[in-house]
Structure formats: structure tokens, C-alpha cells
Amino acid sequence: MYICIDQYFLPMKKIAFFLLIMLLCEAGFCQPKTNASKPQGSTKKTAQKGKTPPVKETPKPVLVQLPSNSNDCFFAVEIKSDFTSEAIAAPKGSGYIMEIIKDAKNPELFELEHNVIWYTFTVPYSSKLLLNIIPENARDDYDFLLFKSTDQYFCNKVANKKVKPILSNLSAPNPQTKGAIGISLKGDKKFINKKSTDAYVSSIDVVKGDVYYLIIDNLSPQSKSYKLNLEFYIDGIKPNLRIIDDKDRKPLSADILLVEKGSEKAGESTEDRIVMNKKNFLTNNIVLVPGYNYSIYVKKEGYFSYHDEFNSDKYLSDTLISIPLKKIVKGTKFPIKNLSFDDETAELTPESKEALSETIQLLTAHPEISIEIKGYVNPYDQSIEKSIEFSRKQAESVMKFFTENGVNSSRMTAVGMTSKEGKSILENYIRNSVLLDKRIEIIIK
């Protein structure tokens, strides 16, 4: 079979091949010949004089993409206490269920859901609730409603208008706050309608363990991202926290992690909560919940790490938490007391091993340092030689325990007292009947 094209008769097979080539070229598979096929030296420069090279575009920040089903109450995104987000992609769509529709009996609601996201959170401790919704574009119109959860049927009750919001902000974007809205200590209204430009509703008192739901709506599907900050404010203990050098007492900047410890009281359990996690922290006031336990960790290069556990009531009257960091210097000594050993074998007794746990943590945190473990004992039957031998065996027992707990033996040496030290201890014992506390010294090498 033949077909006529521009006065030429071509076989059907050739027509099919011709059409296939055209389709491939339209799809971008027909590339022009590259310079690689040209002989060396024949490549022409394409850059023209006077023209600047194209400027590379700055990559856009990665947005947090929330699950698509989180625009329904049943699939609300759970957020932790004192939550501060990165840029979150603006919500799009109203989900499968239109839970919010305004009517005459519920004027504080959205007219309807435009582009929404549901969040839920549990109050970590009795406090005042604060909220900030900060749009990337100050002209984007974000609104929100806050509900207190009732029971497991809460979402059904919202859809059936059996639960009312306790706070709502439907205001128009306020240029003074760059479009930000939220809940503030300075707010004086619980409900703000769309004719207002008031950015913040009043804060409310919330009780530990209560569950809340927050729905955020933006009117336009073209809205840009936003940031979300949820905070629980208390008029708590506010000491000043500072980090200093152990020797010269001068201020230091260091990495700090402050954790509020979870607890189990009356069958109710709470998880650990990070209060502060900062790099190069120097000094600032912190807020502690009265009666709560805390852990604090501090790290700085060239210094020994610091760790402490405390109850906040310790600082009810003391307005300063001063953390001294000890510099890692060759020859630094750390005496370890409250150790006991078997009188025959010099092996550590089980109750003594707990006293060494902090030293193991220190060695684990600083794998770059090597140590000498030195033992000291009282005169052994007034024999200096036996005293020296027994002090060395005790040091070896401690070294063995460290090795069994993950410290590389190549970082450690175990030694006993010197003859001079033994004589001095013995003379002091004979003259003054003063017994030396059995101890181990850790010496940085």
C-alpha cells in the first residue's frame, strides 16, 4: 500500500517509520550533535563578550509536608509541648468531612473550611497557653479555632456542632504583625470576627493532662507556608543560668541540653521534655516548673562534659545556676572515694561499683583522653612493700571494671603508690595514728 505526501508516493512501512521519528523528536529524544563529535581544537566558544553568565538560583527551603488526611479532625497531627516548627506547607483542601460550617447559632466558626489542618496536643503542666501562627506572606489570611477535647467521640461532636470552640480568631491580616495571629497574654478577647484586625486572642489557663484540638484555615489555596509556635507559659522559677571556667571563673559559651524529667504520680505518667537545646550558650534566664526534676548536660571542646540532676525547688531562693567546666589538662586529678575492696584479693566490692559510674560516663564522653589509675592504701602490717603492692592491685581492679564497661584498656594504666609516698603514709600513721582513706585517683595523662 502507498500514500501520497507532497507529490511523493511512499510505502506504508516508511510512513509509519517517518511518523515514529516525528513523535520521538517532539518528545525530546532527537538531540543535536554535540561538540564531542568534532575534532580537537574545532570547538567554538559560545560565551559572547559583554554577557554575564547566568546566575544560579538559590534553592528554596524544604517545607514540612503534613499528611494529606490531616485536614480532617480524625487524623489531627499530634504536636508536643513547647512546639516550634520549621516552615510548613500551606494547607490545601477541606478533607473528606466538612466539620466546620458557620450558622446563626455558631457565629464564631469559619463560614466553611477552605484549606485546613487539624492539630492536637496534650498539656504538659498547668500553665497559660500561648500560640503564634506566622505566615511567610504577610498578606495571607490565616484563621484558627481552638477546641478542648471532650472524649473519644470529640470529632463526631464537632461535626454535629455539639462542641463549641473556646477561642477563635477570624481576623483580617494585620500589617503591624506581618499577618501573624495567635494567643497572647496581652489579648483581651476570646473571639475575634473577620471584620477585625486584632491579631491575638486572650490566653487561657490550661490544666496538665487536658487535650486540645487546633484547626488552622487559610482562605486561598495559593497561600505560602507558615510557622507554628505553641508555648505553655508559667510564672515559674526563673534563675539565671551561666557557664564558667572552673579556674579563672570567666564566662564560657558551650552546648547545653536541659531536660524536664518525666514522672509517674497517681497512675499518671509524663515523658521527658526538652526545655532547652542550644549551641554556644553563654548566659540567660531559664524558666523551671516548681517541684519538677531536671537533667542538665553541658559540652565544650577542651573541657570535661558536665551532667547534673536537680529539683527546681532548689532554686526557689537562689537566683543563679553557675556551671563550672573543668579544662582537660595533663596532670589533672580526680579522687574517687567511697570505694571498698576485698582485704585478700583487692577486688572491688559490688557496692563500690556504683561510685565509678560517673567516671565511666566521663571516659565514654571523652574518648580522646588517656588516664592513669593510682591506688592509695593505709599501711599494710606496717610493711611499705605490701602496701605498695596492694595499692597497685586495687588500681588494677578498677581498671578491669572500666574495661568491662566499654573503656578501651589501651587508654589506661594502673599503678600503686611510690616508695616515698608509702613511707610518708607510714610515718604519719606512726606519729599521729591517722589512717589514710582508701581511695583511687584518676590522673589525666
Image (spheres, grey):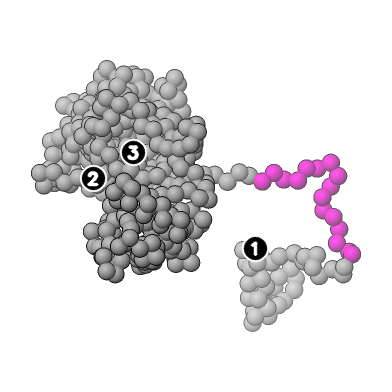
Residue 119 at x, y percent in the picture: 28, 41
Range drawn in magenta: 41-56
**Residue 50 falls inside the magenta stretch:** yes
Q: Are marks 3 and 2 in contact (CB under 8 Å)?
A: no
Q: Which residue appears at 45% of the width and 21% of the height?
A: 175
Q: CA distance from mark 3 to mark 2?
A: 12 Å
Position above or below: 321 against 418: above
Q: Nearer the viewer, residue 382 or 356?
A: 382
Q: Position of residue 164 (x, y in %)?
A: 17, 31
The quadrant of the rendering that contains the N terminus is: bottom right
Q: Which residue is mark 1?
A: 28
Q: Nearer the viewer, mark 2 or mark 1?
A: 2
In the picture, measured across the screen, residue 33 lies left or right of residue 11, that is right
Residue drawn at (30%, 66%), measured in percent from left and top?
A: 346
Can you identify the residue that label 2 sits on?
A: 262
* Of pointers 1 and 3, the one earlier in the residue sequence: 1
Q: Amino acid at mark 3?
A: Val
32 lies left or right of 384: right
Q: Is residue 172 magenta?
A: no
**Residue type at tag 2:** Gly
Q: Against 56, is 220 above or below?
A: above
Nearest the camera: 414 or 80? 414
Query: Residue 368: x and y, percent?
Result: 51, 57
Dot placed on the residue nearer the N-terminal end, 3 or 2: 2
The residue carrying mark 3 is 275
Give the alpha-carbon distance from disc 1 to disc 3, as whole Å. Answer: 55 Å
